[in-house]
Amino acid sequence: MKRVTVYDTTLRDGMQGESVSLSGVGKLRLAQILDDFGVDYIEGGYAASNPKDMEFFKAVRRRKLANARIAAFGSTRRANTPVAEDAGTIKLLESAADTITIFGKAWKLHVDEVLRTTEAENLAMVGDTVRHLKKHGKEVIFDAEHFFDGYKDRPAFARRVLHAAAEAGADVLVLCDTRGGSLPHEIYDITRTVVSAMGRPVGIHCHNDGGMSTANTIEAVRAGARHVQGTMNGYGERCGNADLCVIVPNLVLKMGCQCLRKGKLKDLFKVSHMIDEMLNVPHDRRSPYAGESAFAHKAGMHVNAVQKNPASFEHVAPEAVGNKRRILISELSGGSNILLKAVEMGVEMSKSSPEVRDVLRELEDLERKGYEFEAADASFQMLIQKVLKQRQSFFDLDGFRVIVEKRGKAQPCLSEATVKLTVNGECEHTVGEGDGPVNALDCALRRALMRFYPSIEKVSLLDYKVRILDPEQATAAKTRVLIESSDGKDTWGTVGVSENIIEASWEALVDSVEYKLFKDESRGRKARKPKAPDGEGK
């Protein structure tokens, strides 16, 4: 197996992405997650950039990382400045990181128009900085910035920059597609030429401006690169960096490369979502490997095929990356979808059973009215229970009323909801207040049920989405409400549809509560089920 080292730059390059930031404590926590995941290098920050990054280097030294080496990032010395007096180089050494990554210009355009210095001085800047850092016992990774653009412009110039770093003792030479505009065949051809010419490890660092960063990284490895740089979930400046959550599984599962520690690839789904959560960014559900939709099947023919052989529509096993197969339910569903979804939910049903057709008919009718069950598994399970005539009524609605009151311009709106229910023959009449009408209705419903079903207290509303289904109807438009709920253990989605947003919300809220109660009741039945005598029922 080819060993490919994984260099994560989420804490440096990733933080340069729009709307992405972490506190010092957050950076330490993310470093621990990356170390547990098994990356080889964690680039902690730009040493000369800001005090927060320097604090990180100081704090991370007190932690024992099991796998990763911490790298500090910086540039070559400034033009016409002795390296020992260069402020950036001094900061790199102050970071006390064992690995130092420096970038130097490999495109003559940058030397002429950005640095505004000579080629000879640019080569000296590279060589002096690498030698100085090696003299202090550091592992030095040299990022040849804009290498591919520079090579396409003047190959000899770009090669001289690499040789200057190599002759000074750089441990790894990283070819950077900094503008992110190169194509895979260009990356392959140039990397292959460099690998055959240089007597040391070559790495790759790609940006995604042309949407090619993953393909470009894979092509570089195919051409001989043995060190890949990227960020988790592709965070980074402009269109982002190469996404390690896509690159690593491709290298391991498709190319037979050795990356991470053994068995850690199964943590990919969890780690990818955890990092998005830390950065307060919605996860891309369509992300390859780690997205919720990566192994979601909707078309009836696809589901039927996957049921017979998962390889028919899944290029890898979902479990290999910690993900799972999902069967979606919609008007495109066939009997296989209904059957597999029912089995997934613990409902006993055979494909030839007439109930499958009944569920399909009910589903098609509801979807014509605007319902959608892909993100509302709980509502779909309630639908199955209804069709099978197994839906237990935990309470009956006698009525509800919602009042929204505004007193004066400067005063906030007041929302109050009154709910009247019958539970086990008893009438419960309760009032709830909230930030808005739906929040007030939710509070009133919970309060009404708490005495009868105490477990309701554990249920919290995680997300609330509203979709206008026929905007041409303006304020009279039909509304679909999707609610995501959790009891701290499980998470489930419910849906409601109506021209009245309060009624649609109520429908989704009721399904959410009933699903929780149905779940508790099912678990209770299993817990009460008598055990078979020894030697029986095995």
Image (tube, helix red, strand yellow):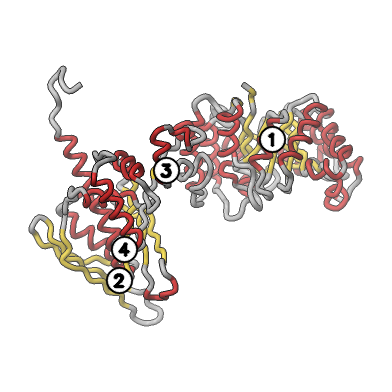
Q: Name the residue that disc number 1 marks.
A: 219
Q: Give amino acid for label 2.
A: Ser
Q: Name the residue that disc number 2 marks.
A: 415
Residue 98 occupies quadrant: top right
Q: Give amino acid for label 4.
A: Ser
Query: What is the spatial separation of the Cα atoms under label 4 and label 1, in whole angstroms?
Result: 50 Å
Q: Earlier in the sequence, mark 2 or mark 1?
A: 1
Q: In the image as oriented, which residue stretches furthest toward the left?
A: 425
Residue 292 occupies quadrant: top left
Query: What is the spatial separation of the Cα atoms under label 2 and label 1, in whole angstroms?
Result: 59 Å
Q: Give amino acid for label 3.
A: Met
Q: Position of residue 471 (x, y in %)?
A: 44, 71
* Residue at 61% across, 35% down: 42
Which marked residue is nearer to the observer: mark 1 or mark 3?
Answer: 3
Label 2's element? strand
263 on left or right of 176: left
Q: Residues within 10 Å of mark 2 (few under 14, many from 20)?
A: many
Query: What is the spatial separation of the Cα atoms under label 3 and label 2, in whole angstroms?
Result: 48 Å
Q: Residues within 10 Å of mark 4 (few under 14, many from 20)?
A: many
Q: Which mark is residue 301?
A: 3
Q: Residues within 10 Å of mark 3 (few under 14, many from 20)?
A: some
